[in-house]
Amino acid sequence: MNEEDFDEILKELEEQKKKLSKLSETANSIIKAIEEQGEFLKKIVEKRGEESILLESVKDIGVEKKNRCYYYRDGLCRYWEWSKDPEGILFVIKSRKFKNKSGEEVWLMDPHPFYCALCWKYEEE
């Protein structure tokens, strides 16, 4: 090998060194962004964890109230009557048309446990 070959190799090594340096900077930027996102996601998970505990507690209370309620029979709440189908309303699992005691056609619903948890008309059987 002659001196020109060594110079060529040195030039190429310098080019590769520059590319690696840029790649290293990019990698460090990516790592920093991931760490920042990780902290953000960790905070979200912690917050959602607290909300999940609250929602699970409300649901458990609702299930208990629903299963013990005087008005809940055959999968439907007999207290709340609707003049039209309540399907699509938040907390309505399903609904059916019935005739009430006065002969009117009304809709009854199977409420989600959240609805039962918040219901103020609850009476134990």
Image: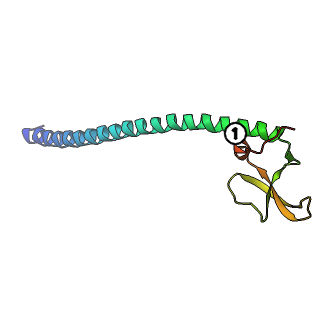
Q: How many marks?
A: 1
Residue sitting nearer the eye, 20 or 105: 105
What residue is shown at x 22% (from left), y 39% (from top)? 21
Left or right? Give the position of 37 relative to 64: left
What residue is shown at x 85% (from left), y 46% (from top)? 71
Residue 34 lies, with reference to residue 78, above or below; the image says above
Residue 49 lies, with reference to residue 86, above or below; the image says above
| Residue 39 on image: x %, y % | 41, 35
| Residue 12 on image: x %, y % | 17, 43
Left or right? Give the position of 30 relative to 105: left
Q: How is the image coloured?
A: rainbow
Q: Which residue is mark 1?
A: 59
| Residue 2 on image: x %, y % | 9, 38
Left or right? Give the position of 85 relative to 4: right
Q: Amino acid at mark 1?
A: Lys
What residue is shown at x 54% (from left), y 38% (from top)? 48
What residue is shown at x 34% (from left), y 37% (from top)? 31
| Rendering quarter of residue 69 | top right
Which quarter of the rendered picture does the C terminus lie within?
Answer: top right
Residue sitting nearer the eye, 13 or 70: 70
Residue sitting nearer the eye, 25 or 41: 41
**Residue at the far left in the pictured view:** 3
Which quarter of the rendered picture does the N terminus lie within?
Answer: top left
| Residue 24 on image: x %, y % | 27, 38
| Rendering quarter of residue 68 | top right
Left or right? Give the position of 94 relative to 56: right
